[in-house]
Image: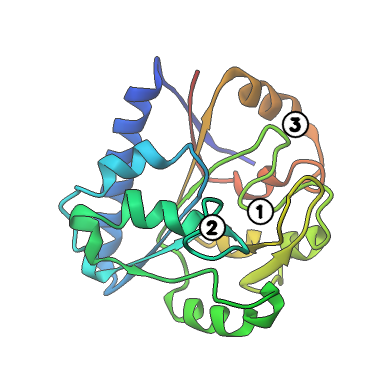
Amino acid sequence: MTYEFQDYPDREMLVINLANQLAGDLSQALDHRERVAFAVPGGTTPGPIFDHLCAADLPWDRTDVLLTDERWVPGDSDRSNTRLLRQRLLVNRAAEARLLPLYAPADHPEDRLEALEAAIAPALPLGVVLLGMGADLHTASIFPGADRLDDALDAKAPILLPMRAPGAPEPRITLSARVLNGALRKHVVIFGQEKRDALEAGRNFSHAEAPVLSVLDGATIHWAE
């Protein structure tokens, strides 16, 4: 497993540089493909990156944006990653992008999984993916100890998996490691010494113990305190 590690003196510099790199990767991909799929995480970390990226001068109308994972909650919930996308990324010039949802109204993700996968499949493989990482070494909603962890890490995994994990208050839906690894360009953003130490300690763990390891080969990791 090989990856590039970029260390920044502060978060502001990381945010600006990473937004520029993502814009460059998308532009390059769009030079060679009619449409490009761009997968991004939710949570608090990517918001400032989205604030810069949404103004990039790109053919956003040929870009499909989707989340790497989503909580199974309505789109107007404070817990919704889709809400973050609509507020922070799919604005300004990026408002022309097409959103591929990872949620549809239903009690359980299994009830809508087939329809959601059918909408995503034509957009694959991913052109560019941005990932986060938790201190427990999860990425997307591929958590250590999750009920479908082995399925999510399988080389023949489906596009999407429903996921339930200890400490996650609601069910999740996530892109599998196979789909994330199919991206032409992979970036991982990490903030804080705790997560850097966790990544360093987890390098010799199994993929089940440290799921983020399953997507790091060929990736660029961006870190700032």
The residue that label 3 is drawn on is 202
Q: Residue at x 27, y 67 (%)?
A: 32
Disc 3 packing (10 Å; few <14; some 14–19; many ≥20): some
Q: Residue at x 55, y 42 (%)?
A: 132
Picture quadrant where residue 209 is located: top right
User: In the displayed structure, does residue 223 sit left or right of residue 140?
Assistant: left
Tag of residue 141: 1
Identity of the amino acid at label 3?
A: Gly
Residue 8 visible here: yes
Identity of the amino acid at label 1?
A: Ser
Q: Which circle's residue, 2 or 3, is located before the other in the chain?
A: 2
Q: Residue at x 62, y 84 (%)?
A: 114
User: Does dot 2 land on a helix, a strand or a loop?
Assistant: loop
Residue 197 position within the rendered picture, expressed as x and y whole percent measured from the top left: 67, 21
Q: Is residue 173 above or below residue 138?
A: below
User: In the displayed structure, does residue 210 sit left or right of residue 92?
Assistant: right
Identity of the amino acid at label 2?
A: Thr
Q: Is residue 38 above or below residue 9?
A: below
Q: Nearer the viewer, mark 2 or mark 3?
A: 2
Tag of residue 68: 2
Q: Residue at x 56, y 21 (%)?
A: 192
